[in-house]
């Protein structure tokens, strides 16, 4: 019984969406860091994904149909939350060593860092709000 109440409170406060937001920001950071680390690797294809579309997918706020799995062994389809982000690789142009643009990657890294900080701050404030609600009489 206590578990269902806790789960209800957490779901209503938006904590699961915040967690998914931070998970996606963390994944994007790893991809960008990998791109920066391979800036001088011949033939390397820079990897990225559309953060906003993926967040819509995992948070259930997208406009597309979402597949439902009735068994954990089923393959997730459509905009299913368990479906991993679609990672795109940029193709290497003829005459280029690889597809990494270091200026673009550093800019993306800074932008992603800001997204993560905002998400973490919002999550912290949600927990502070829950703490205040629990402690008040």
Image (spheres, grey):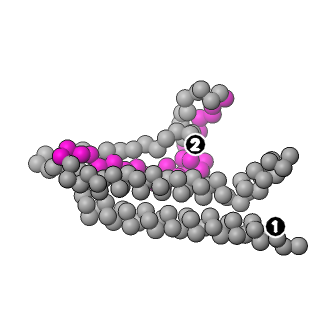
Which residue shows up at 40% across the image and 53% down it? 30
> Residue 40 appears at what percent x and percent y?
20, 53
* Nearer to us in this view, 99 or 32: 32
Instruction: Inspect the magenta stretch and tell me whether residue 46 lies in it.
Output: yes
> In the rendered image of this protein, does residue 92 appear above or below residue 76?
below
SS at badge 1:
helix
> In the rendered image of this protein, does residue 2 appear above or below residue 118?
above
* Nearer to us in this view, 56 or 24: 24
Q: How far separated are the C-alphas under marks 1 and 2?
A: 31 Å
Which residues are drawn in magenta? 42-70
Q: How crowded is mark 1: few (under 14 residues within 10 Å), some or many (20 or more)?
A: few
- Disc assigned to residue 134: 1
> In the rendered image of this protein, does residue 118 appear above or below residue 21?
below
> Residue 38 appears at what percent x and percent y?
26, 51
112 lies left or right of 16: left
The residue carrying mark 2 is 81
Which residue shows up at 75% across the image and 66% down it? 130
């Amino acid at each position: 019984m206590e578990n269902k109440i806790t789960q209800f409170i957490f779901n209503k406060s938006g904590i699961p969406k915040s967690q998914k937001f931070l998970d996606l920001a963390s994944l994007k950071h790893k991809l960008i860091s990998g791109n920066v680390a391979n800036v001088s690797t011949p033939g390397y294809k820079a990897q990225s994904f559309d953060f906003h579309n993926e967040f819509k997918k995992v948070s259930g706020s997208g406009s597309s149909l979402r597949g439902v799995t009735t068994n954990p062994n089923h393959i997730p389809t459509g905009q299913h939350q368990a479906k991993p982000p679609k990672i795109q690789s940029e193709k290497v142009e003829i005459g280029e060593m690889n597809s990494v643009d270091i200026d673009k990657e550093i800019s993306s890294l800074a932008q992603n860092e800001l997204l993560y900080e905002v998400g973490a701050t919002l999550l912290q404030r949600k927990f502070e709000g829950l703490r205040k609600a629990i402690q008040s009489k």
